[in-house]
Image: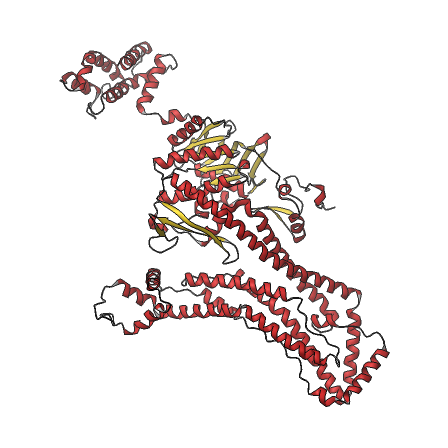
Amino acid sequence: MTQQHNPRSNQIPRTANGVPPHFRMSSEGIVPTDIKAQLDFEAVPQEEKYPSRKDEMLHRIELVQGIGLLHEASGVAHKLEEVALIYAGNGRGKSTLSSILRSASLGDQSIIDERQTIDGSLTPKVKLQFDSGHRVTFSDGKWSEIRSELQIFDTAFIENNVHSGGQVSTEHRKNLLDFAIGDRAVASKKKEERAVTVQKKASADIKQIKEQIAPYAGGVAPAVFKSLKAVENSDAKLVALEKRRSDAMRSQAILAQPLPVKLTLPNFEIDELFDVLNRTLDDVHTQAEEMVSHHITSLKRDNASSWLSEGQQFDDGINCPYCGQSTIDVPLIHMYQTHFNKAYKNLNSAVTRVVDLVNQSTSEQILSKIFQQRAHTNEQIAIWKPSVNISELSDDRDDLATSSLSNLRTLLQGLVVDKSISIAEQHGTTEEYEEAQRLIGQMLGIFADQNDLIETYCAQINSFKEDLQSENVQQLESEITHIKLGETRLSEPVVTLFAKLEDAESRLKKSEKEKREAREELKDTMSTTLSQYRDDLNRHLRNLGAAFEIDEIKTNFLGQTPRSDYGLTLRGQPVQLAGGNPSFDTALSEGDKRTLAFAFFIASTLADPNISERVVVIDDPVSSLDRSRREYTSQVLVEIAQNCSQLVLLAHDANFLRNTRHTFEKGASEKSISTLQIARTVNNYSGFEKVDLDRECETPYFTNYRIVDNFVSGNSIDARNAGVAIRPLLEGYLHRRFPGKVPSGLMLGQVISVIDAATSPNPLVHVQNLVSELRELNAFAGRFHHDTNPGYATDSIDPTSVATYGRRVLDLIHGA
């Protein structure tokens, strides 16, 4: 027996992998497999659909297999704390790891499929351990569950939400809006999605029910069949016949009465519109269009474009037809010729025509005219009602017609606006064409039904008029047929079907209204959220030292889904997101572009009302950033970590990771910190290992000091390594004690000679008392270097001598 959700039970039945029956896992999360499941699911509170994972962390990356350089990488031994710092050199697999976590956050197996190890022998597999030992795995091409609390900043975030190839597209602005709004508009989005789902279901039900009614109707249109009433007995029929005979006596006056006139329905030239939307131009120069458009705008005259276009006929390509000056090599004149070429004119004319076509064909006056016609037709019907069993046309579906036309107007105007802006590009998808056809059919179907009624009424009236002149058997048979159809109309199966039809039409009408209301709610939510979002963005940009800022951020519904519009200003001048001059591609450096993307991410993340439940993964936030931006980045990462469940920071710069760790420590953060590295393993693959960030970041001088000090103090037994470190340690000491005074490129023996020969005021005279000691130390240290001892690698080592001379070197350094 199938489990059903009971809203009062406060629990959703689920299968072993956490997915309710009649649902499936997708890149969008848990989604229903049928409309009933969809409607049931919508009734469940959000917190019951997706159980909270508050404070749940990623504790271990137990295994990554067959993905990129992580061919067989085990991280079982490495626990990830509340702040996990992961170091990896360039090309070691850092971005591969962030992509794996992105795949887990979306349930998108294609992200992993694209990164399968090229020369590997193992199939892709992942094992992640979360709180309480809970494992999430990827095997056989799918994830065991989706971890939507993972929020990733990486190259994919930038390319999907901000820009790619130096361009900011419509899809970027749509995705960015979805990310910025996050869960704050879930209710409105769900309401719109639910309305669309109900709308599609109701339309499909109406079509199916009408098909079921058709066999009962005997060829009569559903709207006509619905209006039929049964004749109860023959006596009533005789009364009607007597009435008709009485009417025949005054037939001349009745016959002169006008017949009801059918409604004139508009013709939506949708194929012509989409034909123009789909046209492109190969010979229109984008720069010409932008340059001329800018010049036309600067003229501030409504007819400037027409004036310039007409003026082309007087241009001989040599002299200005207005002032006679030479126009040779004038770029703007060449741009006019490109901008106003025949192909462009033809397409521009076509676009102008379809703009007018959309405005005219979707005007509210369309319905007003139809309503006026119907009122007039109802007056004509009223004249015939005393003689013929007919009734006035109803207005009960006018709201549906109004909503359909309104949604059609929004769809088509959005498309022609986009086409007008980028005239040379193709617009209008198959889905948008089908949606336009659906809305047109939905609206015209309402009045087509009424025209069917009018046609039937006219037939009845004509029959009545004929009867007034002469009765005939054929007409009587027709009346008998109608009586039978009336009885069928009132039969239980047909009554049930019409009840279902009325319910489906009611659902359709309600869904169209709810769709419109949801969009208004969503627009209000987005407007409020984006206002604060803009302020946060600019604050982060200022703190990151950016020379640009967001001057406006808003939303629009030009198309099927909402998207964001934002403007950039650089040094007080607007920057075009696509094309134009200055453009986003050329005005912003790569560091600026990454800074903008990072600011978008941190503003959205910190404003997320559910940030305490997020595991925030950030891949290389400081790539291409200068020092000041790195310092603020560390600060803001601390702020994110203090608010989220866990911060996982990946970077190829060990110094940045160490400095970020110091920022945490200086801020007295109570967050536990772990470090890990992705390092080279066998066959140049990569694996997980421990890392000492302090050692990774130390200078060669500090390394040599540590080696000698550890051996002298007994913390190391590597005498040869300590002996090798003595000479560079002495060299480093002298260079640091006398910056710029010790010539570079000299061997230690040569440096000692320079010291010995120094005279005042050369500060090297202050170390001349150590020349003898330095020479003895250098003589011993030379045994460990090939330039003074070719057989140094095979000579035996006396650990006691190394310790003695090492102590003398340390005493010299400390004594100084």
Image quadrant for the C terminus? top left
Q: How is the image coloured?
A: secondary structure
Is residue 72 visible in the rendered structure shown here?
A: no
Query: In the displayed structure, does residue 709 sit left or right of residue 321?
Result: right
Is residue 550 visible in the rendered structure shown here?
A: yes
Q: Is residue 471 above or below residue 272?
A: below
Residue 325 locus on image (x, y percent): 21, 68
Query: In the displayed structure, does residue 408 sit left or right of residue 166?
Result: right
Q: Residue at x 24, y 64 (%)?
A: 330
Q: Is residue 483 above or below residue 630?
A: below
Residue 358 locus on image (x, y percent): 50, 68
Q: How many marks?
A: 0
421 vs 782, nearest the viewer: 421
329 vs 165, nearest the viewer: 329
Query: In the displayed structure, does residue 537 sit left or right of residue 472?
Result: left
Q: Residue at x 78, y 81 (%)?
A: 477
Q: Is residue 718 above or below residue 290?
A: above
Q: Residue at x 34, y 15 (%)?
A: 709
Residue 392 locus on image (x, y percent): 70, 74
477 vs 10, nearest the viewer: 10
Residue 458 locus on image (x, y percent): 69, 80
Query: In the displayed structure, does residue 678 sit left or right of residue 309?
Result: right
650 vs 501, nearest the viewer: 501
